[in-house]
Image (cartoon, rainbow, N blue to C red):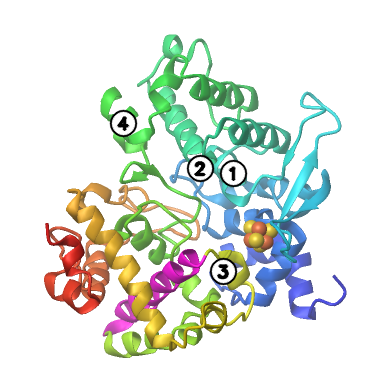
C-alpha cells in the first residue's frame, strides 16, 4: 500500500468522503487506471460500492431512489466493511491483482458461513437497489446464489420488483406465503431469494425474470420490472453514464455492464489501444456523437478482450499492450487497425446472428425508469432523461447496422467479409 502513488492513496482512504463531494457537487474526480488498480487490489470490486451508491452510479430503490438521502449506509457494504471478515485473498490462476477474496462470518445468525467475497454487483443488487444494508445477509445470499447457479443481479432485480409489487397490492400474502415484503428487511429478502431458487410460491414466477413475471401479473407491474430484453439491469445507472444505456439496449447481448460505456472509453484507454477510434470521433458530429464514437470503439475493443480470453480488469487497470501480446502469441503481424476490423467483425457477426434468428431492436428497449422517464426529482440524477432512440440511431449508423432488423446492412456484411455466412 505504501508504494501506491499519493493521489491514489488519498482516494483509497477517502472513498466515502470523495463520493459525498461528487454526489453533492457534481464535480467528478477523473478516473485513472492506477486508482482503479489499487482499489481492485485492495478491495476487489467491493471497493466501489459506496462511491457508486452516493454518486448516482448504482441504482437505488429499484431505480427510483437517491443514494445519499435514501441509502446513506452504503459504506456498510463497501471497501473496509467488506474485507473486515476476509480470511484470505483469492485470485484466478497466476493473477497478481487477486481481486477476489474468501470471507468468513465469525458471529451472529450466519456464523460459520464461509464463501466468496460478494462482488460490487451483488453488494448493490442486494444493497442499495432494495435499501438493504446488512452485509452478513448479503454474504449469505451471495453464497447461496453461487452454489445454486443463480445470477445475483437478476435475483436482486427480481426481489426489488417483488417488493414494489407487494407494496402496491399487486401480489399478496398468499403468494408470498406470509412474507411481509418491504425495503431493507433482511430475513424476508433472504427467504424470498430461497423461494426463487426453490420456485416456491411467488418465487416460481420470479424465477423466470421480471419481464415474464410482469407479463403474467399485469396490473401495472411492468412499471417495476426494470430490464432490457428480459435481462434485469446491472448496477450502473444509464442516467449517469448514457453509454451504459447504449450497452443495455443495443448490444447483441442486452442488459450487460461489461461491454462499453462513456466512462469505459477512458478507463480502457480505447483511443490508445485502437487508434482508429480517433477517426470515428473526428468524423462524428456534436458532443453526443463524439461520445457515441468513443463508446463504439470501446465496444469493438471489448470484442477483442473477450475474444482473446483476457480478464477485462487486467486491461482496465493497466497499460498492457493487448494487440502486441496477441501478435506475440499468434505469430501474426497485424496492425491495431487490423485488430479493430476484427473486433468490428465479431460484434457485427453477433448482431447478424440475432437478426437472422428474428431478434429485433424493439425486443431490447431499455426500461423507461432506467432512461429517466419520468426523471428523478432529487439527487445527482435529478431531471435527467436519456434520449435512447437518438443514441441507438447514432450507434447503429456508426456500426452500419440496419435500424429495422438490428443486423449489419448488406454493404457492411460485404465489407466485413461475412455476407456468405448469413446468405440463407
Ligand atoms: S484475472 Fe481478473 S477476475 Fe481474476 S483475480 Fe485477476 S483481476 Fe480478478
Picture quarter with the C terminus: bottom left
Q: Position of residue 359 (x, y in %)?
A: 21, 49
Instruction: Identify the residue position indicated by label 3 in the image.
Output: 25
Q: Which residue is tagged 1?
A: 122
Work out whether residue 181 can be spotted: no
Write down the residue under mark 4: 212
Label 3 to label 2: alpha-carbon separation? 29 Å
CB contact under 8 Å: marks 2 and 4 = no
Name the N-terminal-most of marks 1 and 4.
1
The picture quadrant where one finds residue 92 is bottom right
Q: Are marks 3 and 4 in contact (CB under 8 Å)?
A: no
Q: Is residue 343 visible?
A: yes
Q: Tell me the SS state at disc 1.
A: helix
Which image quarter has ligand 1?
A: bottom right
Which of disc 2 and disc 3 is earlier in sequence? 3
Q: Earlier in the sequence, mark 3 or mark 4?
A: 3
Name the residue: 59% across, 33% down.
145
Q: Which residues are magenta?
A: 285-308
Q: Which element carries disc 3, helix, strand or loop?
A: helix
Q: Are marks 1 and 2 in contact (CB under 8 Å)?
A: yes
Helix, strand or loop at label 4? It is: helix
Q: Which mark is residue 153?
A: 2
Label 1 beta carbon less than 8 Å to ligand 1? no
Tag 2 secondary structure: helix
Amino acid at each position: 500500500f505504501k508504494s501506491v502513488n499519493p493521489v491514489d492513496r488519498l482516494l483509497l482512504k477517502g472513498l466515502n468522503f470523495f463520493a459525498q463531494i461528487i454526489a453533492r457537487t457534481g464535480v467528478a474526480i477523473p478516473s485513472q487506471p492506477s486508482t482503479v488498480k489499487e482499489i481492485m487490489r485492495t478491495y476487489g470490486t467491493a471497493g466501489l460500492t459506496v462511491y457508486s451508491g452516493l454518486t448516482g452510479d448504482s441504482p437505488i430503490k429499484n431505480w427510483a431512489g437517491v443514494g445519499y438521502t435514501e441509502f446513506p449506509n452504503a459504506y456498510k457494504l463497501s471497501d473496509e466493511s467488506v474485507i473486515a471478515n476476509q480470511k484470505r485473498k483469492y485470485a484466478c490462476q497466476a493473477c497478481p491483482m487477486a481481486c477476489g477474496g474468501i470471507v468468513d462470518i465469525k458471529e451472529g445468525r450466519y456464523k460459520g458461513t464461509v464463501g466468496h467475497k460478494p462482488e460490487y454487483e451483488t453488494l448493490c443488487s442486494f444493497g442499495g437497489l432494495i435499501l438493504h444494508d446488512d452485509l452478513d445477509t448479503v454474504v449469505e445470499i451471495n453464497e447461496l446464489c453461487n452454489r445454486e447457479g443463480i445470477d445475483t443481479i437478476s435475483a436482486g432485480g427480481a426481489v426489488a420488483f417483488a417488493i414494489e409489487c407487494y407494496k402496491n397490492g399487486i401480489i399478496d400474502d398468499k403468494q408470498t406465503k406470509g412474507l411481509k415484503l418491504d425495503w431493507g428487511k433482511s430475513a424476508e429478502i433472504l427467504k424470498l431469494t430461497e423461494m426463487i431458487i426453490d420456485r416456491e410460491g411467488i418465487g416460481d414466477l420470479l424465477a423466470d425474470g421480471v419481464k415474464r413475471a410482469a407479463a403474467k401479473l399485469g396490473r401495472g407491474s411492468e412499471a417495476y420490472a426494470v430490464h432490457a430484453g428480459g435481462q434485469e439491469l446491472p448496477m450502473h445507472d444509464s442516467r449517469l453514464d448514457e453509454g451504459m444505456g447504449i450497452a443495455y439496449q443495443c448490444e447483441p447481448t442486452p442488459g450487460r455492464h461489461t461491454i462499453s460505456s462513456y466512462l469505459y472509453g477512458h478507463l480502457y484507454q480505447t483511443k490508445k489501444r485502437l487508434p482508429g477510434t480517433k477517426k470515428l470521433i473526428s468524423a462524428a458530429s456534436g458532443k453526443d456523437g463524439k461520445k457515441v464514437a468513443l463508446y463504439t470503439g470501446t465496444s469493438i475493443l471489448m470484442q477483442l478482450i473477450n475474444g482473446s480470453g483476457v480478464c477485462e480488469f487486467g486491461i482496465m487497470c493497466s497499460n498492457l499492450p493487448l494487440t502486441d501480446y496477441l501478435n506475440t502469441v499468434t505469430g501474426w503481424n497485424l496492425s491495431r487497425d487490423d485488430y479493430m476490423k476484427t473486433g468490428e467483425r465479431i460484434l457485427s457477426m453477433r448482431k447478424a446472428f440475432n437478426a437472422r434468428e428474428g431478434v429485433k431492436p424493439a425486443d431490447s428497449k431499455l426500461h423507461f425508469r432506467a432512461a429517466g422517464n419520468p426523471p428523478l426529482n432529487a439527487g445527482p440524477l435529478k431531471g435527467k432523461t436519456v434520449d435512447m432512440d437518438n443514441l441507438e440511431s447514432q450507434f447503429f449508423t456508426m456500426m452500419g447496422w440496419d435500424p429495422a432488423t438490428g443486423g449489419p446492412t448488406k454493404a457492411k456484411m460485404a465489407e466485413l467479409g461475412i455476407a456468405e455466412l448469413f446468405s440463407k
